Amino acid sequence: MRNEIVIKTQNLSKHFGSFAAVDQISFEVYKGEIFGFLGANGAGKTTAMRMLCGLSLPTSGQASIAGFDIYRQTESIKKHIGYMSQKFSLYEDLTVIENIRFFGGIYGLAPEVIKSKTESLVERLGMSQVKMQLVKSLPLGWKQKLAFSVAILHQPQIVFLDEPTGGVDPITRRQFWDLIYQAADEGITVFVTTHYMDEAEYCHRVSMMVDGQIKALDTPAQLKKIYNEDSMDEVFYRLARGAKRQAD
Amino acid sequence: MDIILQNICKTYTKSGVEALKDISFEVPKGELFGLIGPDGAGKTSIFRILTTLLYPNSGKATVLGLDTQTHFKTIREKIGYMPGRFSLYQDLTVEENLNFFARLFNTTIAQNYELIKDIYIQIEPFKNRPAGKLSGGMKQKLALSCALIHRPEILFLDEPTTGVDAVSRKEFWHMLKRLKNEGITIMVSTPYMDEATLCERIALIQNGQILSIDSPEGIQRQYPFRLFAVKSSNMSGLLRFLRALKTVQSVFSFGEYHHVTFLNANASVVDELKIDIKRAGFDQFEIKETTPGIEDCFIQLMPS
């Protein structure tokens, strides 16, 4: 896992006027890694993620995502990543199958590939009975599983998950993490934000953003050791408590 | 009793969703009561019925001894409600919003300033900013100030901490404790199970039904199995391995450990597991008995 770097940033910054939303962050993420991107509201996570996804240009610094340059190759970046958030994932007024087809098309998959992927995906998710139903009629947990599967339909190198498990019941939340592990085992890098601190423990490595900077980055076990705390919740609290910015 | 629900049922006719199925419980005066459950459990429907914004199909609800269907006007004067979705006027400033709600309830900011001071003081520097331009944390504080400005007897808070980071969540619960000490009855909902222990009593709710209702300690005490926490250097492999074992009843990830229950948790079961684990070649294996948290209880109570 340590061999291949899929995300590399060097002094990456984004300023809005005189405000440094993201302030010189440097880190690397490896192939197949589950990387937890934590921070308080307003710490700069969303701004950083938008840059990494090729949706917003940095003010300064360097970064390459899946081997593509963050300034010049944003369109290539978009093709080689997947994205899912609690807020945006699927089209509620399309059926399960239509959503899969739609996103397959967006990601430029060939029609016959889409067809075979649709069948295997519906089968694997146990959604054969509901495949012709509108997504809005599905339970939240199913939607999230489908959304994640759709986000990695084109086998991207990296999938970005922005608070993917908000509001779901505890069993569904864990089933969702099973999917994350599977994807990582298949070599997909998972870049995930969450407010559930137990989920920080499921990540291979975790970074903590405070006031636009990365204040800590290590394995959960190592972070707990460094800060001499029993849980990631306490590590988070200790680091984020020192923030000067108002939460957003 | 400040709040009483008796056999409340609610079905939304358009979608056919049975949101509440025969819900009954009571909340005494001055209690900090939590509704704990995932999205779609029915939490918001309960809030909307108690705040007189929604009629149940059947059953009866009283708030401060008043029937929610016949005495809605009086109830509305005596309660404060902070809905899950930000519902203040985005184009009014912070101060204008607060003034608006004060006048709506025939009072002034000055009259009840003491009650909201600790909260409002944090957003006062931005009092001329439109509410729509506030950060999430500040919106939350303004909404709470507006819900409190008429010194309500009961405060209804629907998912005030959803999407809020761990530090701000702790601060928010701190504020609630202070309001409780002022004698205000508080009903609060949350999808974060770790917040359950901050309430005096909680209802675990899912699919329109109450799974259990008690103090957090009471619910934890009722957990019927011996619970073990296990870990090794390969956690996902360990999870798969444990799931396949015949002696294992349930296994779920809980942070750095997996929580395991056994079909028959007799004295030898741990020793046998250790042997199995060793044979399977897991490194740095650790097992210890642990006390169940609210999330363990919720999972155990969920109908399979």
Image (tube, rainbow, N blue to C red):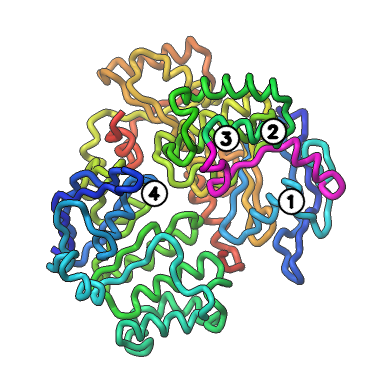
Disc 3 residue type (three-letter): Phe
Image: A105 above or below A83:
above
Q: In the image, what residue occupies the spot 80% across and 53% down?
A: A11
The magenta segment is: A70-94
Disc 4 residue type (three-letter): Pro
Task: Give the foreground label among 1 and 4.
Answer: 1
Q: In the image, what residue occupies the spot 49% across and 35% down?
A: B256
Host chain of mark 4: B
Disc 1 residue type (three-letter): Leu
Image: A134 above or below B60:
above
Q: Position of residue A248 (x, y in %)?
A: 57, 64
Task: Give the foreground label among 4 and 3.
Answer: 3
Q: Which quadrant would residue B79 be assigned to in this image?
A: bottom left
Residue A63 magenta-highlighted: no
Quadrant in which the C terminus of chain B appears = top left
* SS state under label 2: helix
Disc 2 residue type (three-letter): Gly
Asked if disc 4 and disc 3 are in contact, CB closer than 8 Å, the reply is no
Q: Is residue B183 visible to us here?
A: no
Q: Which residue is mark 4?
A: B191
